């Protein structure tokens, strides 16, 4: 049995997937838009066992970003290094362009306790566009993690617990705190501290339902239906109960896997 701590992206991943995956929270800086419809395409692949412990991964979010990454897993460490393009705002005209980004990360520890960091370096400006740090604690009963994100300005603490493995029933919670100046929720900007709680349950082996709510007044739900273990469709929606209008944002998605 391997003692590898995994990669940096694995820190807090279970809670993050339950609370945010497939909800479509992050809209790309550059995306397809027609009338009231936004869309983008996410394509990824991974090639394992180039040599023992080494793999490569490719991901492209069309037309937002893309890149390739090398990953290496050791018994007590995990490393990644990659290069890619990412859409960003340029100049005072707010024009959208692609920035060349070099990313790398390192994690040390084992399957129970791990500590890691990752960073992104912008080649065009020759500055670090981002750097983060994270700590993960995993047991057979629960997974807990603490991250300092966005140049260590935002704290994110998460908790995940699987209740019934047979039905994929699980709960997760995430506490976010910003060390920047206080911002008002009345301006439609999240306040510095917020709590998000989520729950998922498999109604059938091929049907997964998720719900979440946070202290910013957002309530969301997600339903995913799989077919033949290769294709799935999903619908998710979210509304702000503090807003004058409770009109929900509804998103549809399709996924293929090989």
Image (cartoon, helix red, strand yellow):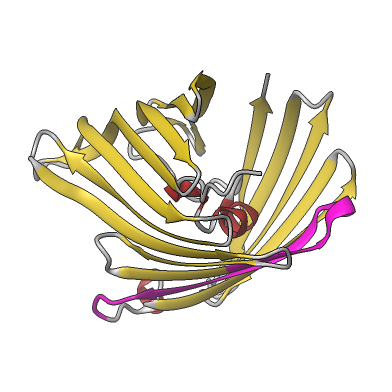
At a point 51% along the width and 46% down the height, the residue shown is 6
Picture quarter containing residue 160? bottom right
Residue 164 belongs to magenta span? yes
Position of 223 with respect to 38 (left or right) is: right
Picture quarter containing residue 67? top left
Rendered position, 86 above or below 148: above
Position of 62 with respect to 164 (left or right) is: left
Rendered position, 76 above or below 152: above
Given residues 77 and 195, the one toward you in this image is 77
Question: Where does the N terminus fall, quadrant-wise?
Answer: top right
Position of 3 with respect to 118 (left or right) is: right
Given residues 153 and 119, the one toward you in this image is 119
At a point 87% along the width and 53% down the height, the residue shown is 167
Residue 198: tell me if it is visible.
no
Rendered position, 216 above or below 151: below
- Mostly what secondary structure, the magenta segment? strand
Q: Position of residue 247 (x, y in %)?
A: 61, 59
Q: Position of residue 19 (x, y in %)?
A: 61, 58
Residue 168: tell me if it is visible.
yes
Residue 201 belongs to magenta span? no
Question: Where does the C terminus fall, quadrant-wise?
Answer: top right
Rendered position, 257 above or below 170: above
Q: Position of residue 172 (x, y in %)?
A: 65, 66
Q: Position of residue 188 (x, y in %)?
A: 40, 69
At a point 49% along the width and 30% down the height, the residue shown is 53
Question: Which residues lie in the magenta part?
Answer: 159-181
At a point 43% along the width and 44% down the height, the residue shown is 27
Position of 200 with respect to 119 (left or right) is: right
* Residue at the extreme right of the image, as rendered: 204
Total count of labels: 0
């Amino acid at each position: 049995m391997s003692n590898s701590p995994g990669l940096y992206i694995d820190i807090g991943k279970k809670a993050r997937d339950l609370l945010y995956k497939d909800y479509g929270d992050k809209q790309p800086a550059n995306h397809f838009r027609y009338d009231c419809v936004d869309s983008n395409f996410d394509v990824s692949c991974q090639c394992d066992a180039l040599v023992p412990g080494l793999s490569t991964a490719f991901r492209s979010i069309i037309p937002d970003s893309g890149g390739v990454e090398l990953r290496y897993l050791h018994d007590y460490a995990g490393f990644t290094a990659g290069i890619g393009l990412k859409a960003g705002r340029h100049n005072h005209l707010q024009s959208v362009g692609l920035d060349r980004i070099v990313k790398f990360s390192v994690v040390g520890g084992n399957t129970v306790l791990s500590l890691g960091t990752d960073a992104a370096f912008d080649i065009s400006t020759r500055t670090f566009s981002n750097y983060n740090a994270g700590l993960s604690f995993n047991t057979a009963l629960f997974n807990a993690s603490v991250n300092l994100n966005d140049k260590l300005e935002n704290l994110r603490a998460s908790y995940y617990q699987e209740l019934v493995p047979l039905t994929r029933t699980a709960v997760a919670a995430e506490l976010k705190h910003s060390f920047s100046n206080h911002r008002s929720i009345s301006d439609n900007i999240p306040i510095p501290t917020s709590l998000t709680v989520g729950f998922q349950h498999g109604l059938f082996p091929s049907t997964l339902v998720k719900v979440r709510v946070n202290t910013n007044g957002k309530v969301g739900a997600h339903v995913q239906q799989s077919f033949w273990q290769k294709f799935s469709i999903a619908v998710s929606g979210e509304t702000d109960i503090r807003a004058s209008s409770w009109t929900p944002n509804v998103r549809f998605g399709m996924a293929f896997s090989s």
